[in-house]
Image (cartoon, rainbow, N blue to C red):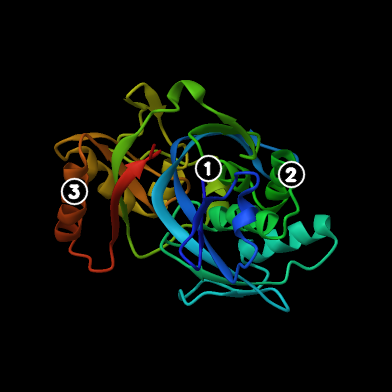
Amino acid sequence: MPLLVFAAGMVCPSLTKGSLSCNLTRMSSVYRAPAKINLSLRVKGKRADGYHDVDLIMARLDLTDELDFHNSRTTTLLCEEPGVPTDESNLVMRAILEFEKHYGRKAKQRITLTKRIPHAAGLGGGSSDAATTLLAVNEILGTQYSPEELSAMAAAVGSDVPFFLNPVLSRCTGRGEQVRPLVPFAGWTSPIVLIKPDFGVATAEAYRKFIGSRRLKNVMYDVQTVKGLRMSNDLERPVFSKFPILAMMKMWMLERPGVNGALMSGSGSSLFALTETHEQACQLATDAREYFGDASLFTYCGTVNPQ
């Protein structure tokens, strides 16, 4: 759940009714937007609307972006991360525009986005930023839209966006916008390490090349079971075919001590390994940088579905 941090140092949970009582003199508010991983991604087939029916299991990470909201005369988005657009192609701005359709007025916010979640990585950073924007302006402006109303706005912005309105471990179906918490696995958690090379993968291309894609030799695509959860990713086939280095990285992680499972997240290019301990996760991050000899390799060790 995103966390609201007021400039004066006061902290309030972003979804608690009445929390705006501490917001009367607000100058700025900082919200944290969590990354996600796909513990499972199954592609069911193409739909008439051009999307694919999917069956996903998604879980949040303790890796977050930050969005700082200020009252302003107009709505603008600022971000210093190279390659991140600040116009209406950014999901944050698309979320604001969708909100304004329902609100009937301008939101008038200056939003400063600090990126920590890698771009085009299969970690849902843009979708999470969009969902957090909807939650933020709903609270800041006191509009009190219901979860159902916010979910409809989120689905109009992007398939993954509704999950981030309440990012508990969930099964997501349809094109990904139908979210159902996996209550029996509510307490499921694990140490994790992420590794991502210095390139991204276009989600649309991964889905487009899914039909007809083949398995690479000596690469493990089978279902992995970790603490009762069955993990697999159908998009590994088309993505690994184009980027064999990702297949090599996955197999390297699976062979490391203490690794319970390893998979590509979403359409990549991030891969993750679930470990027994946090120390093993952090050691794996260090070992990956040394083994692959790539100074640009992104690594992160943290927690899946932090409690």
Q: Amino acid at mark 3?
A: Leu
Q: Are there few (<14), some (14-19), or many (20+) residues within 10 Å of tag 2?
A: some
Marks counted in the figure total 3
Mark 3 lies on residue: 284
- Work out whether residue 300 can be spotted: yes
* Residue 90, placed above or below residue 12: below
* Residue 63, placed above or below residue 224: below
Q: Are there few (<14), some (14-19), or many (20+) residues within 10 Å of tag 3?
A: many
Looking at marks 3 and 2 on the same chain, the residue that comes earlier in the sequence is marked by 2
Quadrant in which the C terminus appears: top left
Mark 2 lies on residue: 152
Q: In the image, what residue occupies the spot 43% across and 41% down?
A: 237
Nearest to the eye among marks 1 and 2: give it: 2
Quadrant of the image occupied by residue 69 = bottom right
Q: Nearer the viewer, residue 301 or 32?
A: 32
Looking at marks 1 and 2 on the same chain, the residue that comes earlier in the sequence is marked by 2
Q: Position of residue 129 (x, y in %)?
A: 56, 58
Nearest to the eye among marks 3 and 2: give it: 2
Mark-to-mark CA distance, 3 and 1? 30 Å
Which numbered marker is on residue 83? none
Nearest to the eye among marks 3 and 1: give it: 3
Q: Nearer the viewer, residue 110 or 247?
A: 110
Q: Amino acid at mark 1?
A: Phe
Which numbered marker is on residue 210? 1
Q: Are there few (<14), some (14-19), or many (20+) residues within 10 Å of tag 1?
A: some
Q: In the image, what residue occupies the spot 22% across and 65% down?
A: 294
Mark-to-mark CA distance, 1 and 2? 28 Å
